[in-house]
Image (tube, rainbow, N blue to C red):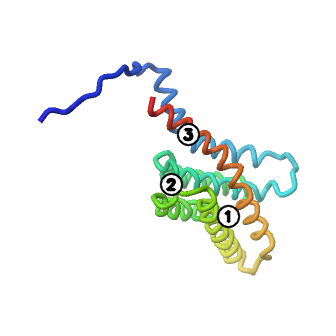
Amino acid sequence: MEVERTPGIRPRPTLWRQFDVLGRQSFPALGTALGMLVIAAPFGLPGQAELLPGFALASVFFWSVFRPAAMPPVVVFVLGVFADLLGFAPLGVRVLILLFTYGLALGWRRRLAGRQFAVVWLVFVAVAAGAAGLEWSLDSLLSLSVLPVAPAVFQFALAAGLYPPLAAVLTRAHRGIAAWERA
């Protein structure tokens, strides 16, 4: 049995081409880490500290649904540790939340990938509500006292509101990467 080969011109695997491939493959992880670093910078904006977990959550959710190969569990773990360190959170809380989000997004990937934006956003809102509740519960458990709920609600609202503009930017990046891979 003969394998049919499609003729075509393939670029030579030069060093610069390999850097380009590596850059495109690592863009989701590096973009998320860089975004978290910028958000953690001391700009003095109100609610800036609460943007960090929402940004990390939205990025991990988006890339886990639309490009899961670029966001493997090890990368999600490292991003969670990075988020904990940048946000001065108890080590492991955001790691657990981001890994949980990754698992949910990966499980629902086939059902969400072709859906309208509103459906994906509503699922993210539910995930963000669960993440805020889980973080509040873990923080309360670790502090051995019941913490106020208002910061968790504010963090949830920021994450839910941040997803649409962030998804618009990430969708353009995702399409650019996909178009390059087809070329």
Q: Quadrant of residue 77?
A: bottom right
Q: In this view, does 114 lie above or below 149?
A: above
| Secondary structure at numbered mark 2 | loop
Q: Residue 62 carries which label?
A: none
Amino acid under label 3? Arg
Q: What residue lies at 65% left-to-right and 54% top-to-bottom?
A: 56
Q: Is residue 140 above or below residue 118?
A: below
Q: Which of marks 3 and 1 is nearer the N terminus?
A: 1
**Residue 129: % across, % down:** 67, 70
**Residue 170: % across, % down:** 62, 44
14 or 137: nearer the viewer = 14
Amino acid under label 1? Pro
Q: Which residue is the site of mark 1?
A: 90
| Secondary structure at numbered mark 3 | helix
Amino acid under label 2? Gly
Q: Which of marks 3 and 2 is nearer the N terminus?
A: 2
Can residue 9 be spotted in the picture? Answer: yes
| Secondary structure at numbered mark 1 | loop
Quarter of the figure that contains the N terminus: top left
Q: Which residue is the site of mark 2?
A: 114
55 or 111: nearer the viewer = 111
Q: Which residue is the site of mark 3?
A: 175
Which mark is nearer the camera, 3 or 2? 2
Which mark is nearer the camera, 2 or 1? 2
Q: Do the residues labelled 3 and 1 touch (CB within 8 Å)?
A: no
**Mark 2 to mark 1 CA distance (whole Å):** 36 Å
